Image (cartoon, helix red, strand yellow):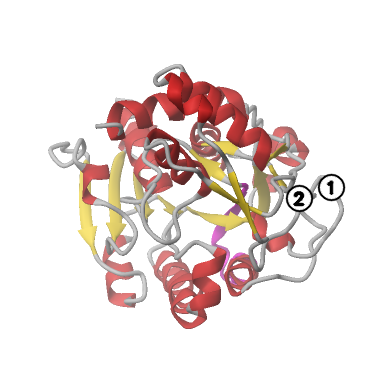
Amino acid sequence: MTENNKKKILITGGAGFIGSNLCEYFLSKEYNVICLDNFATGHRHNLKDFIGNDNFRLIEGDIRNLDTCQQAVQGVDYVLHQAALGSVPRSINDPITSNDVNVSGFLNMLVASRDANVKRFVYAASSSTYGDSVGLPKVEDLIGKPLSPYAITKYVNELYAEIFSRTYGLETIGLRYFNVFGRKQDPNGAYAAVIPKFVMQLMRHESPKINGDGNYSRDFTYIDNVIQMNELAMTIENSEAVNTVYNTAYGDTNTLNDLIGYLKAFLADYDPKIADVVIEYGPNRVGDIPHSLASIDKAKAILGYNPKFSLQEGLKEAVGWYWENLSR
């Protein structure tokens, strides 16, 4: 057993889409993994393959409870903080709960990690922090004003992390996720992400509805690229690499019309009728930015980041997973 194999990782939100993929990956690397989740948006079925693993422990609890956070970080080397209430529309509909989870819960985790002498706190930041900044590609030190309560909460996370690094010496790294997608991403619910939602609709021969004319563009980022970034951020030994934020993306942009075209083509390999499903268009969504594209130069230069999956490569993998797991 190597030195790394003895390390203990706490993954908050570990039953969610990104969190459960991180649990799976680090368990495969023989780390000890603790998952903290309240199952508000995460799912028990995401953890079913880990429950019998001696290196896995589940704590069912809420990051809004400081005692729970303190219990979860005991003996932990690294925290990968994924727990949050995502979705811009959700935050617009209920800003108080989004703030409670994303800000107060985040602060609880920082305090608990500081007090437990956690080596490093790596957290899910968000591309929403760029707000109304119009420059492309998005560079880490140039942001605009937030456009939603969700964006405010994620920016406040960065500010708190910076203060805890400066004031208390807690090593922090923020990963600004850009439109992450892939296996285990939930296609159901009012705030389902666009890719799994479109996939499920197409598999049912239902017409997906695109907000706007389909020419808004995004830097869609496959889950395996995100896992790579979390591992690099957690393990990098360069002291100049910590106490900052990094874009976590592929570094390319595609329109929603591009996206739906790829999905129809890849799904038609399983069901040719999907190629004929008609796409509908509706009004633009409040709080959405028109275009998003990340510069990943900083992550490449400092962390050695090298994303393996483009949008098309990631979609092929994701579509195969959804067809196998959800088409019945």
Write down the quadrant of residue 233 in the picture. top right
Write down the quadrant of residue 37 in the picture. bottom left
Residue 29 place in picture, x, y as percent: 35, 29
In the image, the segment drawn in magenta is 160-178
Residue 171 or residue 322, whichever sits in front: 322
**Residue lying at 22% horizontally and 59% vertically, measured from the top left:** 59
Question: Does the magenta-highlighted stretch encompass residue 169?
Answer: yes
**Residue lying at 16% horizontally and 38% vertically, measured from the top left:** 54
Q: Residue 94, which numbered label? A: none
Q: Is residue 59 above or below residue 206?
A: below
Residue 322 place in picture, x, y as percent: 37, 32
Give the mark toward the camera: 1 or 2: 2
**Residue lying at 36% horizontally and 69% vertically, measured from the top left:** 63
Q: Is residue 190 above or below residue 220?
A: below
**Residue lying at 36% horizontally and 35% vertically, measured from the top left:** 26
Q: Which residue is mark 2?
A: 291
Residue found at the very far left of the displayed protein: 52
Secondary structure found at label 1: loop
Residue found at the very far top of the displayed protein: 269
Disc 1 residue type (three-letter): Leu
Residue 315 makes an appearance in the image: no
Residue 257 place in picture, x, y as percent: 67, 38
Residue 132 makes an appearance in the image: yes
Q: Residue 136, which numbered label? A: 1
Mark 2 surroundings: few (<14), some (14-19) or many (≥20) residues within 10 A? some
Residue 180 or residue 69, whichever sits in front: 180
Secondary structure found at label 2: loop
Question: Does the magenta-highlighted stretch encompass residue 159?
Answer: no
Position of 60 compared to 154: left or right?
left
